[in-house]
Image: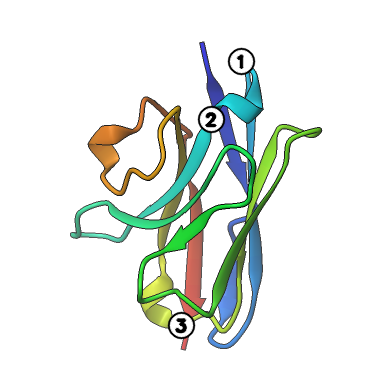
Amino acid sequence: QVHLVESGGALVQAGGSLRLSCALSGRTFSDYTIGWFREAPGKEREFVSAISQSGEGTYFTPSVKGRFTASRDNAKSTTYLQMNSLKPEDTAVYYCAANRRWLVLTAKGYDYWGQGTQVTVSS
């Protein structure tokens, strides 16, 4: 069974930066594409980013492209989401998720989920 744990969420001022981490255990990390999603109060969970098994492929939703980057360290079984130039509209609970396919942009397409980490951006 795959187990995912996010960390790194915090309260930050607009324009600031955060780095989220997602650690995977229970299976071979490099077998999985990792996706990031976010869910703001009263809104549906939305796709943010995905990184391929090798880390060579990344994809970002247009609203974060140019501000967020994704990376992974397969030796540490950890994925990172670097978030720069944060805006109040980035406020949400951020989730990482795993599946074995590329490229999946919908939450339904992911098999395993973390518990989420809160990101709050103040204006």
**CB under 8 Å between discs 1 and 2:** yes
Q: Amino acid at mark 3?
A: Lys
Please tell me which of labels 3 and 2 falls first in the chain: 2
- Give the distance between the C-alpha atoms of the residues marked 1 and 2, in whole angstroms: 9 Å
Label 3 belongs to which residue? Answer: 87
Label 2 belongs to which residue? Answer: 32
As drawn, 67 above or below 99: below
- Give the distance between the C-alpha atoms of the residues marked 3 and 2, in whole angstroms: 30 Å
Q: Nearer the viewer, mark 1 or mark 2?
A: 2
- Give the residue drawn at x 48%, y 34%: 114
Residue 25 sits in quarter: top right
As drawn, 111 above or below 86: above
- State the SS at label 1: loop
Is disc 1 surrounded by few (<14), some (14 to 19) or many (20+) residues within 10 Å? few
50, 13: nearer the viewer: 50
Label 1 belongs to which residue? Answer: 27
As drawn, 50 above or below 92: above
Q: Amino acid at mark 1?
A: Arg
Please tell me which of labels 1 and 2 falls first in the chain: 1
Q: Amino acid at mark 2?
A: Tyr
- Residue 99, given in percent of the width and then of the height, sits at 43, 29
